[in-house]
Amino acid sequence: MKRGFLILVTLPWAAAAVAGQMVDRPVNLARNGRTPHVNYMTECQGCHLPDGSGMAGKVPAMKGEISRFLTVEGGRQFLIQVPGAANSKLSDADLAAVMNWIITTMGKPAAGTFTPYTPEEVASYRAHSLQDVATVRGRLVSRFAVQEPPTGATSSR
């Protein structure tokens, strides 16, 4: 019985491997076993939406906007200290990975301008919570270079 079950369970996997149809396991799995994209889907997209466009007047857009925070002093810290990130159930390593994914896929920073977050950096920023998120965000946004957001980006400032 056990042998028959084992054959039944492993046969499809073995056949797919022989046929060259096995999908490699992602090498960038987070510590919780999920990719940064899956962590985004489970932890962030409920408010920021699948494409990062946010909800005008309620939830800020990340798409085309998030990298702008990296251009002003305090912006890098702010991205980790916002309540959704700082209070996330993700570990520091998983939060670093998802933020790096968000910034590189939705923010599209200029080549060579983004230094990925480390788990240690995330831990240090999480240790200092924001008291007035809207005021801090407004101050940072007012420092953005005067420029139009990239084509197709929406802003909820």
Image (cartoon, grey):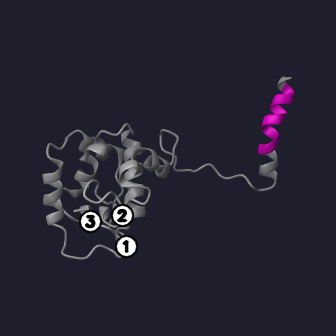
- Marks 3 and 1, how far apart in space? 15 Å
Tell me which corner region of the image, top left, top right, bottom left or bottom right, holds residue 43.
Answer: top left
N-term mark: 3 or 1 = 3
Residue at x 29% of width, y 60% of height? 56
115 is within the stretch colored magenta: no
N-term mark: 2 or 1 = 2
Region rendered in magenta = 3-13
- Would you call the spot at circle 1 few (<14 residues within 10 Å), some (14-19), or many (20 or more)? few
Label 3, on which residue?
Answer: 68
Name the residue furthest top.
1
Relative side of 106 to 14, left or right = left
Chief secondary structure of the magenta span? helix
The amino acid on which the numbered mark 2 sits, given as a three-letter code, is Lys
- Would you call the spot at circle 3 few (<14 residues within 10 Å), some (14-19), or many (20 or more)? many
Label 1, on which residue?
Answer: 152
- Marks 2 and 1, how far apart in space? 9 Å
- Which residue is nearer to you in this view: 93 or 58? 58
Q: Are marks 2 and 1 in contact (CB under 8 Å)?
A: yes
Give the structural element (helix, strand or loop) at label 1. Answer: loop
Label 2, on which residue?
Answer: 63
6 is within the stretch colored magenta: yes
- Can you tell which mark lies on residue 99? none
Give the structural element (helix, strand or loop) at label 3. Answer: helix
